[in-house]
Amino acid sequence: MGSITRSFANNIGSSGILSASAVTNATVEDVTAFGTAPSPATLVLISTQTASSSANISFTTGLDSTYDEYIFKFINIHPATDSAHFEFNMSTDGGSNYNVTKTTTSFYAYHNESDTDTAVAYTAAQDLAQSTAFQRLIPDAGNDNDQANSGTLTIFNPSSTTYVKHFIANSNSAHQDNYSINWFIAGYGNTTSAVNAIQFKFSSGNIDDGIIKMYGVKKS
Amino acid sequence: MGTITRSFANNIGTSGILKAGAFNNASLNNVTALNNAIALGNMVLISSQTASDSATVSFTTGIDSTYKEYQFYFIDIHARSDGQAFTFQSSTDSGSNYGITTTSTFFYSKHKENDTVAELSYNTGKDLAQSTSFQQILDLGNGADESGAGQLQLFNPASTTYVKHFIGTGSSYGDDDAEFTSFCAGYFNTTSAINAVRFQMSSGNFDGTILMYGIV
């Protein structure tokens, strides 16, 4: 028996099962999927896009029936234009058109840095009623050098061909007038067609900087 | 051929590829990394700390540029002193000082067990305006079964360009026997990287578990 074979034989335990010393990271580097083993992932990163003076960011692939819930995280979104509204819309034709009819709610809590203005309130100016317009997620975003906006948008079961498509968003913004504003936006895309693309943009000007990540939440 | 060798030979399939029977969990004890194609968890538990009559719980390592979002889950936070707030602040000097200038909002919904109060309201006593104070997130009684729980998101703490946004929600058993659902959000108004976060009561010690996750 050669030395390699002998060494290997020492790595075989009783019942012919390999012992830990027989397997290293390199041994399994070609393994890209496991059979029936449960994947440890429940929150699966599907794609990441980084804005750099971008007119919009669109997710036109990966939004399908694989997951019942998709989560978009937008991090440090910085507008090129002061007071522009960060907004999104859905598409049922792979991104050719972003114009799904929506009915939504919008409320917010705000507080300015000078401590003179606070409230939690519904704002009819930011909701939609059977409108195909883009839904604002962060209105009036400031574009000072240190101002940016972050939050989360969750869309439920976009591939359903039976039900409307619900979404819930929660974000915090650095408002143009030096307010901290916590936005709560929710609603439904009033379509029974599958939603298969999402677009983010500002109402005016580019997305100067920022990252948007799309995750899928595993069904089981 | 020995018995073990013969058993192992039975675990070699055609083309010399090992069958599943050649491995068990123990075989993989030395595997600490997998091919990137394998979907690993994108919510990574970085650390967990348990408070037991503790004055503070501080996370002074693990908050860096590795993740764009950190999430803290605080579970079964029990105040040792009645009617106190569970609070947090951050640090840009690895925990030597916790007092980053903060502007924030705070609103809540509340419902008393005796059904005499059911309200939604902004609370100016719990928000911050360019303040270095700790941000309140839970409002707790200290009865034996009274506690609170919730979650805090912190976005891109390592940025040296932008302010650092946070969003927190919580559910508290208040000292007036009420459910107190809290919503606080704001930004640490600094362009320095935040590298530590501390939790403490407004007064007194606390019990509970705080988990810190990174979101890939």
Image (cartoon, helix red, strand yellow):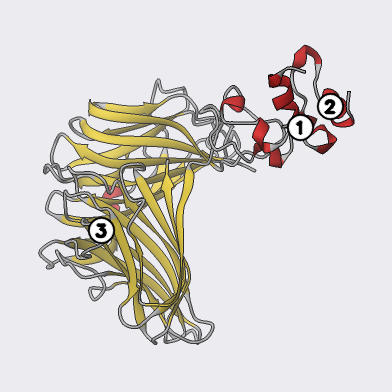
Q: Which residue is mark 3?
A: B186
Residue at 12% in and 68% down: A116
Q: Residues within 10 Å of mark 1 (few under 14, many from 20)?
A: many
Q: Residues within 10 Å of mark 3 (few under 14, many from 20)?
A: many
In this view of the protein, can residue A132 be seen by the observer?
no
Residue B5 has which mark?
2
Image quarter of residue A132: top left
In this view of the protein, can residue A13 be seen by the observer?
yes
B11 or A2: nearer the viewer: A2
- Across and down, in percent, residue B214 comes to 41, 47
Q: Residues within 10 Å of mark 2 (few under 14, many from 20)?
A: some
Q: Residue furthest top?
A: B15
Q: Amino acid at mark 1?
A: Ile
Question: Same subunit under labels 2 and 3?
Answer: yes
Note whether A159 is above or below B138 in the view shown.
above
Q: Which residue is mark 1?
A: A12
Q: Which secondary structure, mark 3?
A: strand
Q: Nearer the viewer, mark 1 or mark 3?
A: 1
Q: Which secondary structure, mark 2?
A: helix
A4 or A219: nearer the viewer: A4
Residue at 16% in and 62% down: B101
Q: Earlier in the sequence, mark 2 or mark 3?
A: 2
